[in-house]
Amino acid sequence: MMSRTVSSWILSSARNGIVLQGKGRLYSICIPNRNKTKWKLVFSKKQLYPAGSSRLDNVFSLKAFRHTSTEEEHFSFQLSPSQINDILRAGELSHKILTFNGKNANSVLRFESNQLASNTPIEDRRSAATCLQTKGMMFGVFDGHGGSACAQAVSDRLLHYIAVSLMSRQTLEELELAVECMKPVLPILQWHKHPNDVEYREITSQYFENLRVYWQHLLDLDTELGFSLEEAMICAFKRLDSDISLEVQAPQENELMRNVALQVAFSGATACVAHIDGVHLHVANTGDCRAVLGVHEEDGTWSTLPLTRDHNAVDEFEIRRLKREHPGSEEKTLFVNDRLLGILMPSRAFGDVQLKWSKELQHSVLENSCDVGDLNIYQYVPPNYHTPPYLTAEPEVTYHKLRSKDKFLVIASDGLWEMLSNEKVVKLVAGHLSELNVQKPQLAFEKPVNLGYMHSLLLQRKNKGIASLDQNIATHLIRHAIGSNEYGEVDQEKLAAMLTLPEDLARMYRDDITVTVVYFNSETIENYYRNNK
C-alpha cells in the first residue's frame, strides 16, 4: 500500500495538484546528496486568504525534477503504523500533578509535550519547571535559528532568571550568604525534563556565576518591594540576552566556554514562557512562538483566546515599532522580502548579535576567535546596516485570570502554527479530550463489564479510526500538522513520506515542531472564586 518512493510521491503530488503547506520561501534550488542525485525544487506562492486572516496566509505548490548521474535510485518511505508511531512518540513528555488526600490545589492538572525534528540536530528546545519560590509552574518553548546553541542556553537559563527576579530581598540575601559561606544552595527550580533533553553540564558553573552577578545586581537596587510578575519576566529576558552578549566579549581561558559563547551569541532563539500560579497566568513572548487558550463556552462550543502576538517582519505593530526606532532614511531597507534587513523573519529574538552589535564590535570579537570557521559562525553583515541594534529580546507580557471555562493552554514553536491555525489546534485538542472521555468507562474499574460489551466497544473504536489514539495530545497535534490532507484527515502515505524525506529535503516541507499543552484543573479554579467571593 505504501510502496511508492519519495520521488514518485512528490512527482505525483505535483501532477495531481496537491497543495503542500510550506515555510514561506520562494526560490528554486538544486540539492546534491550522497547518492549523486539532484532534486530541483520549484516552489510557487499562492495567496489563498487575506493577509492577517486566521487561516494560513502562505501555501505552496511543488513541482520536482529528479536527475542522477548513475542509475536511478529511490528513497523508500515504506513505514508501518508502528514505525510511524515510534518516530512520532520518541520525544513525548507527560507529567501529572500529584494529589494530596485526593485533592489537588494546583490549577495545573497535567501537561503533555513533544518534539519532532526537521533540522539535524533539532534547533527547538522546551522547558518545564516548578518555581520553588512562587510555587507557580513555568513552561517554555524556544525556537532556535542559525543552530541550536542559543535555544539550548536560553532553555537552560531563562527560567532561573525569572525565578531569581521573583525572589524577595530576604531570600536573595540568604542565597548570597550561602554562596559566600560555601554552603549548599537550595534549588531554585524543580525541573520536569525528558530523559533525552540536552544539557551542557560542563558550563553549568559559569552560568551559575553569571546568575549570581544578576541577583547581586538586584540586591544593589536597594528596594524592598521587588518586581511584579510582569516586570520580573521582562527584566529576566533582557538581562539574559545582555549576559549572552557580554559573555562572548569577555576573555575566556577555557576553550569550550569560548566556543559555546560564540555559538550562543551568533545563533538566535525566539521564546515563549508561561508562568501559572493559581488563577494567575502570565505569558511572556519574544518572537514567533505562540500561546493560545482553549475555552469551553457555556453553550458547549469551543473558542480560542490568543495570548501572544507574532513578532515578525509582516506584523504591522512590529513594522511601526522598528520604523520609530530608526531614521526615516532606512524605511525602505528595514524590511526586504518580508524579513528584517532581508535576513531574519522574527523581529525579536535572543542572541543574533550580528543584528545588534556595531560592525566594529563584530569584527573585533570574530578576529580574536580562531575557531569561527569550524564553528560555522554566521559572519555576513547585511547591506544597509547603519543604526544597530535592529533586534531586541524584550518580551511582550500578557496577563490572564483563569476561569473555569479555560480548559487548556497550547504553547508551540512556529513549526506547528505554520501548518495549523489557532482554531484548528483548539478543535483538535478538544476533540482529543472528547475521545479520551468516551474511552474512560472502558478503562475504569468502577463497574464490571462483560467481554461481549468490551469487544463491541473495541470494534466501534476501530471503525472510528481511533484504535491507536495518541495518549499524548502534543503527538496528536504533530501527527495532524505534518500528515493532514486537504480534508483535515491524516493521510498515512503523506505522513510516512514527511517522516522519511532525505535530510536535505525535509526542511523544505516542515520546520522543527515543539508543542506543550497544559491542562487546567477546573475544580481548583472554581474553588478559588468560591472562596474569594
Image (spheres, helix red, strand yellow):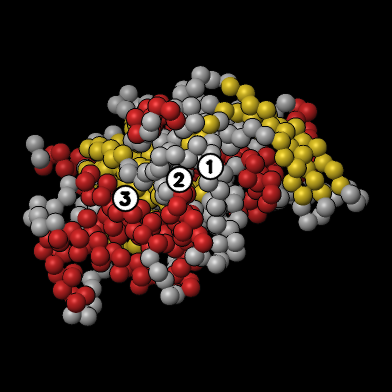
Q: Secondary structure at mark 3?
A: helix
Q: Amino acid at mark 3?
A: Phe
- Circle 1 packing at 10 Å, graded few (<14), some (14-19), many (20+), is few
Q: Residue at x 32, y 28 (%)?
A: 297
Q: Position of residue 381 (x, y in %)?
A: 53, 46
CA separation in Å, label 3 and label 2: 17 Å
Q: Quadrant of residue 394?
A: top left
Q: Are marks 1 and 2 in contact (CB under 8 Å)?
A: yes
Marks 3 and 1: which is nearer the front?
Answer: 1
**In screen coordinates, is 210 left or right of 79?**
left
Numbered mark located on residue 237 in the image? 3
Is the C terminus in the top left, top right, bottom left or bottom right quadrant? top left
| Amino acid on which disc 1 is placed | Pro
Give the label on residue 382, or none. 1
Q: Which mark is residue 355?
A: 2
Question: Residue drawn at (81%, 55%), measured in percent from left and top?
Answer: 35
Q: Earlier in the sequence, mark 1 or mark 2?
A: 2
Image position of 256 with respect to 228: above or below: below
Q: Earlier in the sequence, mark 3 or mark 2?
A: 3
Viewed as shown, does residue 9 lie left or right of 380? right
Q: Residues within 10 Å of mark 3 (few under 14, many from 20)?
A: many
Q: Earlier in the sequence, mark 3 or mark 1?
A: 3
For label 2, the SS is helix
Front-lying residue, 208 or 160? 208
Say few, some or many: other residues with alpha carbon within 10 Å of mark 2 (under 14 / 14 to 19 / 20 or more).
many
Q: Is residue 105 or residue 200 the one in the foreground?
A: 200
- Whether residue 392 is visible: yes
In percent of width and height, residue 477 lies at 51, 42
Query: What amino acid does circle 2 point to?
Result: Leu
